[in-house]
Structures are given as C-alpha cells and as structure tokens.
Image (tube, rainbow, N blue to C red):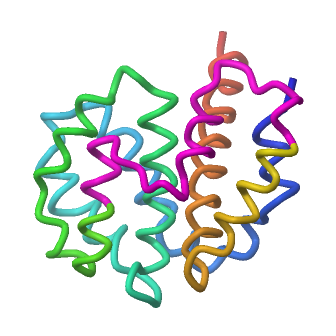
C-alpha cells in the first residue's frame, strides 16, 4: 500500500511555497472550520476568508488560487460529508477576489468538473487504498501536473498535500485527545 502523503512529500516540497503559505495558512485553517458550518458561515467565508485567501501571487491563476484548487479537489474527493456545501459555494462571485480564469476554475472544481490533465490524479486520490502497482503511473501523472503553467501544477499538488497533511494532523490530534 502506498502512503500518499509520504509519496507526495517525495515528489514536491511545501518549502517551495513557504512565502505563500505564510500569507494564507491561517485562512486555510479558518476555511476548514467554516465549511463545516455552512450555510451559517457563508457570510464569513465570503466577506473575510476568501478575500484573504484568493488572488495572491503571480499569473493568470494566482498561486493562492492554485493552492486552493488542490485543497478543494482533495476535500471534494476525501470528505463526502461536505461535498454538497462545496458545490453550493460555486455560486459565489469569485471575480471579486481573483482573475476571471481562476474564478472559472474554482467554480469547475466546486462542481466536480476537474480538467482532463488532473483526472488520473483525482481518480488515484479517490481510491480507498492506493495500491503500489499504481506508483509508476502516479509518478508520471505527477510529473505531467508539475509542468502545468509556470507553477500552477506544482502549487495545485502542494494544496493537495497540505490538505492531506491537515487531515492526518487532525486525525492524530483526535487520537491523542481520546
């Protein structure tokens, strides 16, 4: 069985995105709590979290948006209890916070419409247990994703890794508390 977190750590480094994470991590953590309190938290997400989370960095899809896309993809796949809430978020006017291209991509991801370039990876992410037979395919898929845009693919994968680590840390904290 493949430890997906360890595998991604070997393929990418969150250190490459330290500046970005230093700017947005507290809002990513806030988003984790707020999405579980949807729809009561809708106004907080729209008025305070998203404006501080999106549109940061360079490019037609700013780096913080690419990171957020990785987080959304991972949440949509791994956390079925909030899929509906995430889908409802597609009605938010993201153009107020970021570029039109990013806003479009965010809506697509929230509606489970992942680009073809990411399909193999999202399919792998959806597997209950990652078989080691898939490792070679996964490596080549990750290589292709890393080449998307100047840094968009790499930052997307960083978002996936960040979210998986968040789940792991949360799970470990729950175990320690009991």
Outermost residue toward the top in this view: 178
Which quarter of the rendering shows the N terminus?
Answer: top right
In the image, residue 42 above or below residue 61: above
Residue 167, image x, y percentages:
60, 34
**Left or right placement of residue 67 versus residue 41 in this view:** right
Residue at screen point 41% across, 50% down:
114
In the image, residue 131 above or below residue 49: above
Residue at screen point 58% across, 35% down:
123
In the image, residue 3 above or below residue 63: above
Residue 76, image x, y percentages:
41, 36
* Residue range of the region highlighted in magenta in the rendering: 106-135
Q: Quadrant of residue 4?
A: top right
Residue at screen point 11% across, 64% down:
93
Q: Does the magenta stretch include residue 171?
A: no
Outermost residue toward the bottom in this view: 58
Q: Which of 98 and 152 is in front in this view?
A: 152
Residue 98, image x, y percentages:
27, 78
Q: Which of 151 and 147 is in front in this view?
A: 147
Q: Does the magenta stretch include residue 116?
A: yes
Magenta span dominant secondary structure: helix
**Left or right placement of residue 153 versus residue 45 in this view:** right
**Left or right placement of residue 11 versus residue 97 in this view:** right
In the image, residue 56 above or below residue 21: below
Residue 37, image x, y percentages:
25, 31
């Amino acid at each position: 069985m493949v430890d997906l977190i360890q595998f991604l750590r070997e393929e990418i480094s969150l250190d490459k995105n330290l500046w970005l994470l230093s700017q947005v991590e507290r809002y990513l953590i806030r988003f984790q709590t707020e999405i579980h309190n949807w729809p009561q938290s809708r106004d907080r997400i729209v008025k305070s979290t998203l404006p501080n989370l999106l549109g940061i960095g360079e490019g037609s899809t700013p780096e913080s948006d690419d990171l957020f896309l990785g987080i959304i993809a991972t949440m949509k796949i791994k956390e079925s209890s909030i899929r509906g809430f995430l889908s409802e978020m597609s009605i938010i006017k993201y153009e107020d916070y970021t570029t039109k291209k990013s806003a479009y991509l965010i809506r697509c991801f929230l509606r489970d419409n992942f680009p073809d370039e990411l399909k193999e990876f999202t399919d792998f992410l959806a597997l209950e247990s990652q078989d080691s037979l898939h490792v070679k395919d996964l490596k080549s898929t990750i290589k292709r994703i890393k080449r998307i845009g100047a840094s968009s693919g790499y930052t997307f994968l960083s978002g996936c890794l960040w979210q998986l680590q968040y789940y792991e840390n949360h799970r470990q904290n729950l175990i320690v508390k009991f």
